[in-house]
Amino acid sequence: MRWRNLGESSNVEDRRGTFGMRRVLPVRGKASALVVLLVMVAGYYGIDLTPMLTGAGPEVSISEQDSRRASPSAADQELARFTSVALKTTEDTWETVFKNSGLDYVPAKMVLYTGVTETACGYGKAAMGPFYCPADQTVYLDLAFYDDMRSKMGGGGDFALGYVLAHEVGHHVQHLLGMDQKVRAAQSRTDKAGANRLSVMMELQADCYAGVWGHTMQQGGILEPGDLAEALNTASAIGDDRLQRQSTGRVVPDSFTHGTSQQRYSWFKRGFDSGNPQMCNTFDGNR
């Protein structure tokens, strides 16, 4: 991708190198007398523990590690800048699409974090991979996922990284259109296998929406030779069937939540070839 001369998004919060935090809560009940005594003794030795009485003081780390991460490397900073640029291109894409439909696009926010962080959907962990939280309309991303994608999943390349981000923004588009609420309601009325099938439809539609973004990158002259192949290889690499076979040696279709490699490939390609989100109706059984 020819991205280095493009603008960055203003909707990025960088939490890398810090931990998700929680405040110490004030102590109540029988333990309060002991805490008061502890505060008094500590004060005698010049240590201020009064925040324990108010709950307004030092934050306690909930990290899975005991020390802060090192400052991001130059390579990490370059990757963070690319991610910010890629987010801006999704904003430009969907602002145009929504405007053409007479709608206003509200951009998603993005949080870059390290290891673990707080979200409106609970605590996010790097092991979860990139995810979208509809409660705060934010994409959460630990950049270490990109290394895993290259080394463990057989994907990689800057356009492939953009595809992963554009997929999560696709979930934001679904949220703005009210589709995620409808799907959750339908999932509550069916069994687990049925709920999984609906989840697959949602994920494949987000893949197709990512393809729509890819189409605008191609039309804007931003793509380079080999970029499309990178994204398609990545779409195939993260199919449920392939990941299940790699991890357990067997495939259980009823447990799929994101779609097969072929499905993810095909729906991304459909969005990429058409550039039309109307072609992304994965809920139409005739497609």
Image: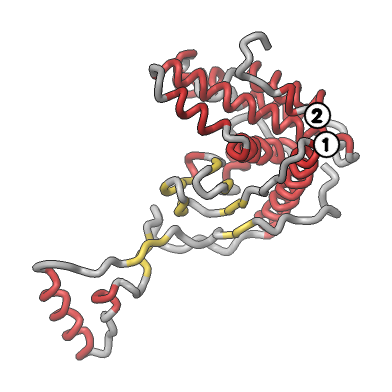
Q: Residue 179 appears at what percent x and percent y? A: 57, 31
**Picture quadrant of residue 113:** bottom right
| Residue 18 versus residue 32 in the image, above or below | above
Mark number, residue 96: none
User: Which residue is painted at 63% across and 48% down in the image?
Assistant: 108
Residue nearest the observer in this picture, 151 or 189:
189
SS at badge 2: loop
User: Which residue is painted at 50% across and 62% down in the image?
Assistant: 18
- Residue 31 lies left or right of residue 107; in this view the side is left
SS at badge 1: helix
Neighbor class of circle 2 (other Cα within 10 Å; few <14, some 14-19, many 20+) is many
- Residue extending farthest to the top is 286
Residue nearest the observer in this picture, 187 or 9:
187
Q: Decide: marks 1, 2 in contact (CB < 8 A)?
A: yes
Residue flagged by tag 2: what amino acid is it? Gly
Q: Residue 252 appears at what percent x and percent y? A: 46, 14
Residue 158 in sight here? no
Q: Residue 103 appears at what percent x and percent y? A: 72, 41
Q: Residue 237 appears at what percent x and percent y? A: 63, 25
User: Which residue is painted at 45% across and 27% down in the image?
Assistant: 185
- Residue extending farthest to the left is 30
| Residue 86 versus residue 241 in the image, above or below | below
Residue nearest the observer in this picture, 276 or 20:
276
Mark number, residue 216: 1
Q: Which residue is mark 2?
A: 275
Screen quadrant of the N terminus: top right
